Image: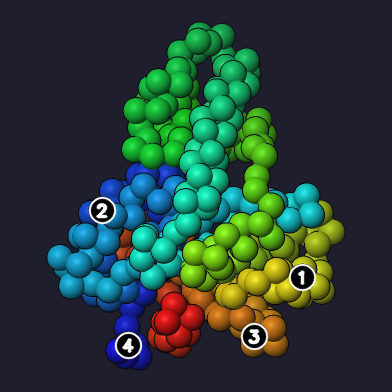
């Protein structure tokens, strides 16, 4: 069903979370780039999946629903990707958990706005409102929406400056779901849980600042495999930059995990040109294994 040398993007974000483009726009970009397989993995929401699936079908692009869920593992915040054959297979319990995460994101944003309001120059105090930040988001509210609002108000020159000056230092962490519980719900929904960007420093297993180095990654992954983890995102921009793709591919092989890869496409929000979507160098082996698990 799937051929080699095709282009894939199975980790990307739309305006329903912290991406720049709508699901339909992502499909148009994929079509322009000759991408043949897509999955939308917005943060903690399935809201944009139906739009993407319909647009992809019209464009003759193979697609399947996905999500990126923020989870907790031994006090660390990780990102867990999940891929499904169809939205119909997602259990109501998992949908409810995800919807609850959306409510937590709203509360987190209110707290973050209060923190930022207390540290911006006096002339900008009281200018940032939750309603205006919410208007920039079609789905879950995320820090990029606040960053864009701060740039619009000219508190900072650009969204990137908002992160550099305020949003990292004054971030508000939310209570995340336990990774073992989420993996079990994904498996019960006939989904495929894949650990996102395990070596990207933030939201990952590898973090030398917290004394989590490469030997610790394998130990943690082995535990996650015992929970039912099925895949590992090995081919990833930061892994490529650090020359560690081979390390993660070897780990995936050793632990029997499906190796995947992506650009983690958000758009210009994180300085990604549209021609980057679908440029991950990988074959279709992961997709064949997905199909086997889906049955």
The CA span between labels 2 and 4 is 23 Å
| Quarter-of-image position of residue 217 | bottom right
The CA span between labels 1 and 4 is 32 Å
Mark 3 Cα-neighbour bin, 10 Å: few <14, some 14–19, many ≥20: some
Q: Earlier in the sequence, mark 2 or mark 4?
A: 4
Query: Residue at label 3?
Result: 256
Residue at the (37%, 35%) spot, across then down: 137
Residue 235 visible from this viewpoint: no
Query: Residue at label 1?
Result: 223
Residue 101 visible from this viewpoint: yes
Badge 1 element: helix
9 lies above or below 111: below
Mark 1 Cα-neighbour bin, 10 Å: few <14, some 14–19, many ≥20: few
Q: Earlier in the sequence, mark 1 or mark 3?
A: 1
The label on residue 51 is 2
The CA span between labels 1 and 3 is 13 Å
Query: Residue at label 4?
Result: 2
| Quarter-of-image position of residue 245 | bottom right
Q: Position of residue 200 (x, y in %)?
A: 63, 61
Indicate the quadrant containing the N terminus: top left, top right, bottom left or bottom right: bottom left
281 lies above or below 134: below
Q: Are marks 1 and 3 in contact (CB under 8 Å)?
A: no
Q: In this orientation, which residue lies closer to the viewer: 204 or 245?
A: 204
**179 relative position to 130: left or right:** right
**141 relative position to 107: left or right:** left
Residue located farthest toward the right when viewing the structure as drawn: 211
Badge 3 element: loop
């Amino acid at each position: 069903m799937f051929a080699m040398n095709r282009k894939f993007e199975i980790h990307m974000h739309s305006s329903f979370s912290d991406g720049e483009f709508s699901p339909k726009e992502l499909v148009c970009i994929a079509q322009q780039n000759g991408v043949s397989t897509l999955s939308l993995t917005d943060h903690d929401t399935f809201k944009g999946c139906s739009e993407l699936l319909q647009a992809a079908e019209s464009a003759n692009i193979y697609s399947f629903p996905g999500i990126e869920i923020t989870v907790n593992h031994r006090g660390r915040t990780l990102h867990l990707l999940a891929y499904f054959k169809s939205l119909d297979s997602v259990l109501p319990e998992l949908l409810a958990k995800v919807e609850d995460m959306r409510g937590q994101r709203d509360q987190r944003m209110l707290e973050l706005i209060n923190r930022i309001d207390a540290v911006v120059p006096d002339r900008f105090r009281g200018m940032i409102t939750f309603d205006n930040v919410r208007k920039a988001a079609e789905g879950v509210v995320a820090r990029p929406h606040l960053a864009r609002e701060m740039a619009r108000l000219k508190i900072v020159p650009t969204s990137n400056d908002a992160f550099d000056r305020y949003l990292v230092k004054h971030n508000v962490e939310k209570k995340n779901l336990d990774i073992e519980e989420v993996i079990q719900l994904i498996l019960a929904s006939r989904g495929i849980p894949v650990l996102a960007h395990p070596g990207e420093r933030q939201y990952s297993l590898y973090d030398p600042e917290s004394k989590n180095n490469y030997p610790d990654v394998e130990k943690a992954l082995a535990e996650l495999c015992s929970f039912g983890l099925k895949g590992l995102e090995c081919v990833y921009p930061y892994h490529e930059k650090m020359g560690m793709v081979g390390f993660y591919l070897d780990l995936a092989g050793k632990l029997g995990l499906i190796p995947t890869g992506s650009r983690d496409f958000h758009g210009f929000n994180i300085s990604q040109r549209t021609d980057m979507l679908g440029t991950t160098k990988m074959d279709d082996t992961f997709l064949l294994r997905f199909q086997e698990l889906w049955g």
